């Protein structure tokens, strides 16, 4: 049997740990394993390389992806899709394992619909796939943001300022929500909840009146301009307000322990499912690894953790 693996879309810490788990499980099972470089672009151009034990040595702790990644527009065309399927035929691949987020798993489903055996492993810092509690890379991003906010808080407090920290997540507020709770931010702004700037401003003024010397607002990138918000907030509160756009710092770095374990678990399960001839998207639900049909995963609606937001509002005053 032959399995190929690719990483697609935005990289996420833990992708390498998953590549390692897939490769080593394949070798253990006597399956030949090939790495495709550059995501679906590399699949179209048949950039396959055989992976051996040592190909994945010393990578469990590294961010990024040793296979490189891309956001492929060609793959979305009929011609690109056909070429991709043809590459798999040329290399006599029995199953493809795709590591990536929303768009990448959508691509995996397109291949599945054309008769390719595909396993999807959810990897994205955004945590925007509803069928799984967590995507690989999300918890690491939350840790990175939490660490960054503790630095920002020091200088914000020293000057008696407010700081609006813009975080990634595309249309999903999970990075802002979880790191808001873990960093003790005073307020968060997420796409899932309508913005009430007066509520945030009142909270800041009350804090200032009590002698509080900092006010941290975590703003998800899907909520518009952090600079515009900061300007209005400063006008309403009279508090000197700065903006920090954390950007790509959130996507790199060593994966957290949680992400390494999740990646190892799902990488291992991916090979087992592929060996059994199944085409499925893997995930993590209620503390357990799960396998779901590709048709199901895009039907589920993401539920925002309003309970976590309530906790933040209660304890971060
Ligand atoms: O999907 C991960 C992500 O980092 C999003 O949070 C962000 O909006 C996007 O990718 C940035 O994409 P790019 O790397 O193409 O600029």
Image (spheres, rainbow, N blue to C red):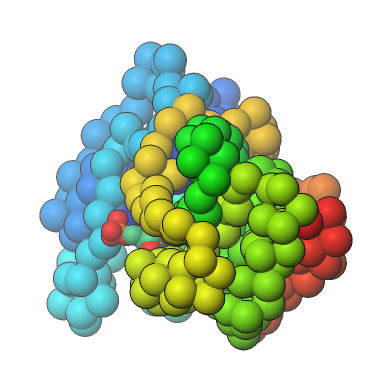
Residue 314 appears in the picture as rendered: yes
Please give left or right for residue 286 compared with residue 78 in the image.
right
On screen, residue 275 above or below 205: above
Residue in view at x 55 percent, y 69 percent = 237
Please give left or right for residue 35 compared with residue 295 in the image.
left
Q: In terms of image quarters, where does ligand 1 lie?
A: bottom left
On screen, residue 68 above or below 242: above
Residue in view at x 38 percent, y 14 percent = 54
Residue in the foreground of this view, choosing between 138 and 177: 177
On screen, residue 167 above or below 229: above
Q: Estimate the x, y position of residue 273 in percent, counting from the top left.
A: 63, 50
Quarter of the view holding residue 312: bottom right
Please give left or right for residue 58 compared with residue 187 in the image.
left
Please give left or right for residue 7 compared with residue 171 in the image.
left
Residue 291 appears in the picture as rendered: no
Residue in view at x 17 percent, y 71 percent = 74
How many numbered dots are placed on residues in this image? 0
Residue in the foreground of this view, choosing between 135 and 98: 135
Residue in the foreground of this view, choosing between 151 and 138: 151
Q: Estimate the x, y position of residue 259 in percent, counting from the top left.
A: 61, 37
Quarter of the view holding residue 8: bottom left
Q: Estimate the x, y position of residue 68 in percent, counting from the top left.
A: 27, 42
Residue in view at x 20 percent, y 71 percent = 73
Name the image quarter holding the C terminus.
bottom right
Q: Estimate the x, y position of residue 306 in percent, counting from the top left.
A: 78, 71
């Amino acid at each position: 049997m032959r399995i190929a693996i690719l990483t697609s879309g935005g990289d996420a810490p833990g992708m390498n740990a998953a590549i390692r788990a897939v490769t080593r499980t394949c070798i253990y099972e006597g399956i030949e394993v090939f790495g495709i470089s550059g995501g679906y672009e590399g699949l179209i151009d048949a950039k396959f390389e055989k992976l051996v034990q040592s190909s994945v040595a010393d990578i469990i702790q590294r961010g990024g992806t040793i296979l490189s990644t891309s956001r492929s527009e060609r793959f979305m065309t009929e011609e690109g899709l056909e070429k991709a399927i043809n590459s798999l035929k040329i290399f006599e691949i029995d199953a493809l394992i795709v590591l990536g987020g929303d768009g990448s798993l959508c691509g995996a489903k397109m291949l599945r619909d054309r008769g390719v055996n595909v396993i999807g492993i959810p990897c994205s810092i955004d945590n925007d796939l509803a069928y799984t509690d967590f995507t690989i890379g999300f918890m690491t991003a939350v840790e990175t943001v939490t660490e960054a906010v503790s630095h920002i808080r020091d200088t914000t407090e020293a000057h008696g300022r407010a700081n609006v920290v813009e975080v990634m997540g595309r249309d999903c507020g999970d990075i802002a929500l979880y790191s808001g709770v873990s960093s003790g931010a005073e307020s968060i702004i997420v796409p899932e909840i309508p913005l009430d700037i007066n509520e945030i401003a009142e909270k800041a003024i009350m804090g200032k009146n009590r002698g509080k010397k900092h006010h941290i607002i975590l703003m998800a990138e899907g909520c518009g301009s952090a600079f515009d918000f900061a300007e209005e907030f400063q006008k309403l509160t009279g508090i000197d307000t700065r903006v920090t756009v954390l950007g790509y710092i959130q996507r790199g770095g060593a994966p957290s322990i949680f992400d390494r374990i999740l990646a190892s678990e799902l990488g291992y399960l991916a090979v087992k499912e592929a060996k059994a001839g199944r085409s499925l998207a893997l995930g993590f639900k209620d503390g357990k690894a799960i396998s779901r049909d590709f048709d199901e995963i895009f039907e589920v609606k993401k539920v925002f953790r309003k309970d976590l937001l309530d906790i933040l509002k209660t304890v971060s005053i």
